[in-house]
Image: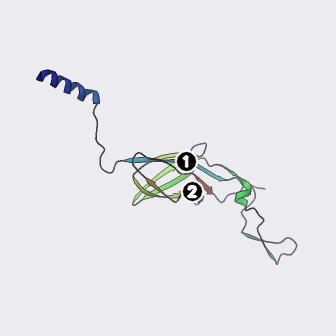
Amino acid sequence: MRIILLVGLVMATAACGAYRFPEPGSATGTVHGQVVTLGCGGPIQPDTMACPAQASIVCPRPSPPISQACGTRPLTGFELTFTKDDTRRIATTGSAGVYSIDLPAGTWRVSAATSARIIDGPQTVVVSAGASIAADYVIDTGMRAAA
C-alpha cells in the first residue's frame, strides 16, 4: 500500500513539472498601446499672429486649433521612456505606431525619449503583476509638412 501511495505521489509531482515560485520583485505587467502624431501641414506658428491687413494688430489663431483640424497618423520608430527610481526602460513603436513593454510592478513615469512632447496620454502608469495596461499617446514632434 505504501509503495502504491509513493508511486502515485511521484507521478503527481512529475505531472506538475518543475514549478518555480516567483522571486520577490520579479513580477511584471505589460504596458501597450499606440503612439500617433499630429498630421498637420504648414509651419509651426505661435498662438497669435499678425493680421494680414494691419501688421501692428495681433489676432488670435483661427478656430479650431490646428491639433483638432489636422487628424493624426501612427508614429513609427518612436521611443517612449519609462522611469521608476533609477531604472529606465525604453519601448519603441513598430510600423503601425504600436508598442508593448513588460515592466516590473510599480509606478512608472512616462516621457518622450526625444525632444518631442506628449500632448495626450497618461504621464504615469501603475503596473501590477500579471496586468495588461493600455496607454495610448499623442505626440507633438514639432515638425510640420510644408503647406
Element assignment for label 2: loop
- Identify the residue at the far bottom of this view: 56
- Disc 2 target residue: 121
- The x and y percentages for residue 15 are 28, 27
Q: Are marks 1 and 2 in contact (CB under 8 Å)?
A: yes
Instruction: Mark 1 or mark 2: name the one nearer the start of the chain.
Output: 1
**Pointer 1 local density, CA inside 10 Å: few below 14, some 14–19, many at least 20:** some
Q: Is residue 17 left or right of residue 87?
A: left
- The x and y percentages for residue 19 are 28, 36
Q: Nearer the viewer, residue 60 or 143?
A: 60
- Disc 1 target residue: 33
Q: Nearer the viewer, residue 97 or 18?
A: 18
Vertical relation: 13 (above or below) 79: above
**Pointer 2 local density, CA inside 10 Å: few below 14, some 14–19, many at least 20:** some
Q: What is the CA distance from the residue labelled 1 to the residue labelled 2? A: 10 Å
The quadrant holding residue 61 is bottom right
